[in-house]
Amino acid sequence: TVPSFKTAVVKSLLVTEDAGSGTTITITLVNTSSAIFNVYKDKAVGSKETLELLTHPLIMEEGEALKVQAAQANELHVIASILVIKPTKVETTYRHKETGELFKERKDWEAKGYKEEDMAQDVNVVMPSLDLFGETK
């Protein structure tokens, strides 16, 4: 599960079956609303096989969880290479849905008598620069 105020980059996901009998696995991403997204569904892992399951980095947000479940209780090992990043800055603004008027703080629009259902909260998360793909010169 990604910690509070962080973003995670899952760079690699290795799965190894060591029992010699093979199995299938399901890998899911669960978001903060408990919605479940299949990354892999019933992926076959052969006897004594090692698989690299990600071809591109998987970006996960605060509170999201990555879950792995095997069909049988075999000797299955999962190794994830995960980089957890703290944002450099989080900027929150409030916008009136009809007029588009912007406010820096909640107290500012409350002072004007606007109701919460009239407002939208916009969050801009500034992340540090990451070079996930190296270059060869």
Image (tube, rainbow, N blue to C red):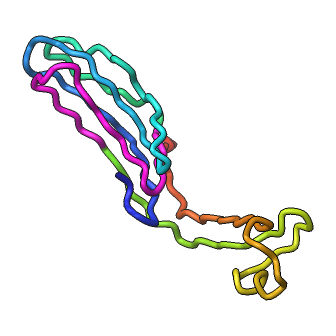
Q: Residue at x 16, y 19 (%)?
A: 72
Badge count: 0
The quadrant in which residue 80 appears is: top left
Left/right of residue 6 with respect to residue 12 in the rendered view: right
The image position of residue 3, as x and y in percent, is 37, 61
The image position of residue 68, as x and y in percent, is 29, 33
Q: Is residue 12 above or below residue 19?
A: below
Left/right of residue 60 with respect to residue 122 in the rendered view: left
Left/right of residue 88 with respect to residue 26 in the rendered view: right
Q: Residue at x 88, y 67 (%)?
A: 100
The quadrant in which residue 121 appears is: bottom right
Quick check: is 61 in the magenta stretch? yes
Q: Residue at x 47, y 33 (%)?
A: 37
Left/right of residue 50 with respect to residue 52 in the rendered view: left
Q: Which one is in front, 23 or 105?
A: 105
Magenta-tinted stretch: 57-80
Q: Is residue 77 above or below residue 2?
A: above
**Residue placed furthest toward the right:** 99
Q: Residue at x 23, y 38 (%)?
A: 79
The image position of residue 61, as x and y in percent, is 48, 53
Quick check: is 22 in the magenta stretch? no
